[in-house]
Every structure is written in structure tokens, then in C-alpha cells.
Image (tube, grey):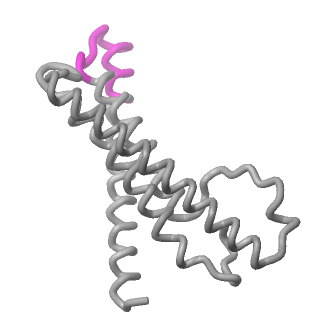
Amino acid sequence: MNAWLPRVQHGITRIEEVIMALLLGAMILLAGSQILLRNLFDSGLVWADPVLRIMVLWIALFGALAATRDHRHLRIDLVSHTLSEKNQVLLAKLHDLFSGLVCLTIGWHAARFVYVEWQEGSTLFSNVPAWMGEIIIPVGFTLMGLKFLLNIPLKTLRDESP
């Protein structure tokens, strides 16, 4: 493995973590502001609820990216504990291949959806285009798919994480 690859992966991880922290902080501030405005002043920000919904979508997909990176996705495992170490590694590689292909397929169809939204000029609120909030869907699933596929050759008999 190249010496620069771990540094690039670490940099990408830091960027993902910073984005998630900023999103979560902004969500807390915006939701808290909405609660205070509604309860104390009988008003609120008309754009806050749609923005919060989009932020939830973004943080969910960044969380899924982090789960993919850390091998923390939920798995239904009925047989791997009964297999030999060699077959466990093979099963883990098949899992990553299948998961990667599914994520890339979702990413492809999500990109088609976002493209249609862009063509139609759909908006989230005010004049903010809907595709700007939805772009995380194809990007997130494509990145997850690539992470799964790039992980396949890294699996060895000594891997602790499936």
C-alpha cells in the first residue's frame, strides 16, 4: 500500500467528521431557535422546517458513510461463525461486493432522480432548487459503494472487522 493512501483516507475521514459536526451543531441551533421562537413569540422561521429535513437527510447519509468506513453497518449473520477463517474472509468479500453493487445502483438511480428534479426546476423553499438538497443521495450512495468495493482487496485472514 502506498504511503500517501493512509494520509488521504485520514484527511477524508476528518472532512466527513467536520461536516457531520457542523450539520449536527447547525441542526441543534436551528431546531432550538424554532422552539424558542414558537413558544415565546408565537412565530418562527418559515424556511427552518424544510432546511431541518434536508439536514437530517445529509447527516444520515454522512453517518452511513462513516458506518461504511468503520465497518459498522448492520448485518444479519447466520452462518459466518460456522465457517473456517478462509471462508469467513471470502464471505466478507462477497458481502462487500454485493453491498457495493447495491449502493452504486441506488446512487445511479438517485442521480437520475436528482437530474429530473434539476430539469423540472423543483424548489425546496423560496427559490432554493430541490436538487441542491437532494444531491447528497447519489453522492452518498456512490461513495458508500466505492468504499465497499475498495475494501474488498484489503480483507485478509487477520482482519478482525467483517
Give me the residue at 20% from left, 20% from top: 125
Give me the residue at 38% from left, 56% from top: 143
The kind of secondary structure the magenta stretch mainly shows is helix
- Residue range in magenta is 32-47
> Is residue 35 on the magenta stretch?
yes
| Image side of residue 151 versus residue 155, left or right | left
Give the image location of residue 159, x and y in percent.
Answer: 66, 78
Near-viewer residue (59 or 105): 105
Give me the residue at 32% from left, 43% from top: 136
Res. 158 image quadrant: bottom right
Give the image location of residue 153, x and y in percent.
Answer: 53, 77
Give the image location of residue 160, x and y in percent.
Answer: 69, 75
Vertical side of 40 occupied by 48: above or below: below
Vertical side of 97 occupied by 83: above or below: below
Q: Is residue 25 visible?
A: no
| Image side of residue 15 versus residue 73, left or right | left
Near-viewer residue (27 or 65): 65
